[in-house]
Image (spheres, rainbow, N blue to C red):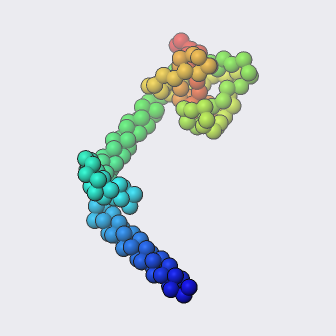
Amino acid sequence: MRRKGNTKNKILIWLLSIFLVLSLTLIGLSIFFEQVPDKTADFVLKKIRGDSIVHLPSRQSLIDSLDKKDEIIDSLRMELKKYEKLKTHKRALVNVESGTLNMRAKPQLASSIVAKIPDSSFVDVMYFDTRYYYLNGKRGRWCKVKYADTTGWVWESFIQIQKK
């Protein structure tokens, strides 16, 4: 009886030792490949099975790529700010049946409401989103507007551009 308990303990210690060695090996390989452990484990398992392996880009190359994209985004934001300062905005009249138009922080219905614009108010149209979406079955775009020193996004079908 005593031997069975002793044998079970030895097997448990042996299994825990193997687990510890495999875990430390995985961590070491993750550091070497500069990848997260789950991707490294996937790489090792594919190598053992003989599957074709797609080499993942290094961490540094991904960081460099993100830095380049961030530079592009920053330069576009600067250009957009210049455009907004030109004040060549068109005026538009709010036309809603509900009495107020929700101005949102981002061009999305799920975005927070930053202001409620009363019907028949005028807004300055800064620019339109370049993508078209469907809202209640109608195709349209989001429009960035300024109203009472607040800027935000409204759906274009709720405003009417005024002719100069």
The outermost residue toward the top is: 163
Expressed as whole percent of the image width and height from the top left, the position of residue 76 reads 37, 37
Image point 70% across, 21% down: which residue?
A: 119
Observer-nearest of 112 and 61: 61
Observer-nearest of 125 and 87: 125
Image point 53% across, 17% down: which residue?
A: 139
96 displayed left or right of 77: right
Observer-nearest of 130 and 162: 130
Query: Does 74 appear above or below 154?
Result: below
The outermost residue toward the right is: 99
Expressed as whole percent of the image width and height from the top left, the position of residue 67 reads 33, 50
Position of the N terminus, as image quadrant, is bottom right
28 displayed left or right of 161: left
Image point 35% across, 55% down: which residue?
A: 42
The outermost residue toward the bottom is: 2
Expressed as whole percent of the image width and height from the top left, the position of residue 63 reads 32, 53
